[in-house]
Image (cartoon, grey):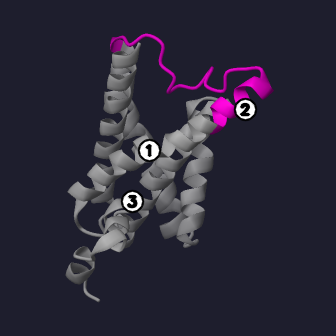
């Protein structure tokens, strides 16, 4: 099947190709990625809510995504610094593991998740970013495999900045 035929796949198969960056429709990758990022935290938040009483502590305490006050430093950090720096880390790990070492893609995605979760705090709440970083690594991997790793980097940076902007807006709205 040609790339253009794959880009027009229908149903869930087409959505999956767009979400994971396997198609050339980068705009849909970003839209579906934002939706995925917001929805992927719900099961973990439910799990945290169910275990908070058992563990006698707040699983989100110490998590970098649990923002108290929104100020200029947090906005710059979330929108200007974190997306390109963390996405560069994702791109580097994907390149190192899948291109240089020629290991399977799932190892590259797993390595990104294992290395990115602690960057958001050494608490249970940091697991909230794991599905999103797995998605970013998968998008970067698929773009790298087709020879456009830099294009994948820009898709991931844009997706990351939008997700962080929505998180900031949500936090600001509900605080």
Residue at 46%, 50% (x, y): give it.
90
Going from N to C along the chain, the mark reached first, 2 or 1, is 1
Residue at 51%, 67% (x, y): give it.
98
Mark 3–mark 1 CB contact (< 8 Å): no
Reading the image, the residue beneath label 3 is: 139
Label 3: few (<14), some (14–19) or many (≥20) C-alpha neighbours in 10 Å: many
| Disc 3/disc 1 C-alpha distance (Å) | 18 Å
Under tag 3, what secondary structure? helix
Q: In this view, does 128 lie to the left or right of 141?
A: right
Residue 165 position (above or below residue 172): below
Q: In this view, does 6 lie to the left or right of 38?
A: left
Foreground label between 3 and 1? 1
Range of the magenta residues?
47-72
Reading the image, the residue beneath label 1 is: 39
Q: In this view, does 155 lie to the left or right of 46?
A: left
**Residue 116 image offset from top left, x and y in percent:** 56, 42
Between 85 and 3, the one lying in front of the other is 3
Foreground label between 2 and 3? 2
Going from N to C along the chain, the mark reached first, 2 or 3, is 2
Under tag 2, what secondary structure? helix
For residue 51, the mark is 2
Q: How many labels does the image show?
A: 3
Residue at 36%, 41% (x, y): give it.
160
**Residue 104 image offset from top left, x and y in percent:** 57, 72
| Disc 2/disc 3 C-alpha distance (Å) | 32 Å
**Residue 47 image offset from top left, x and y in percent:** 65, 38
């Amino acid at each position: 099947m040609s790339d253009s035929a794959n880009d027009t796949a229908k149903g869930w198969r087409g959505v999956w190709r767009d979400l994971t960056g396997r198609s050339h429709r980068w705009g849909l990758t970003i839209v579906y990625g934002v939706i995925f990022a917001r929805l992927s935290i719900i099961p973990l938040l439910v799990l945290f809510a169910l275990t908070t009483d058992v563990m006698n502590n707040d699983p989100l305490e110490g998590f970098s995504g649990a923002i108290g006050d929104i100020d200029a430093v947090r906005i710059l950090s979330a929108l200007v610094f974190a997306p390109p720096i963390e996405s560069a880390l994702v791109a580097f790990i994907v390149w190192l593991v899948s291109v240089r070492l020629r290991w399977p893609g799932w190892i590259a995605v797993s390595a990104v998740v294992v290395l990115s979760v602690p960057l958001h705090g050494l608490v249970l709440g940091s697991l909230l970013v794991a599905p999103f970083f797995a998605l970013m690594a998968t998008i970067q991997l698929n773009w790298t495999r087709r020879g456009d790793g830099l294009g994948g980097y820009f898709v991931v940076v844009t997706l990351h900045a939008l997700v962080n902007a929505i998180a900031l807006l949500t936090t600001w709205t509900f605080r």
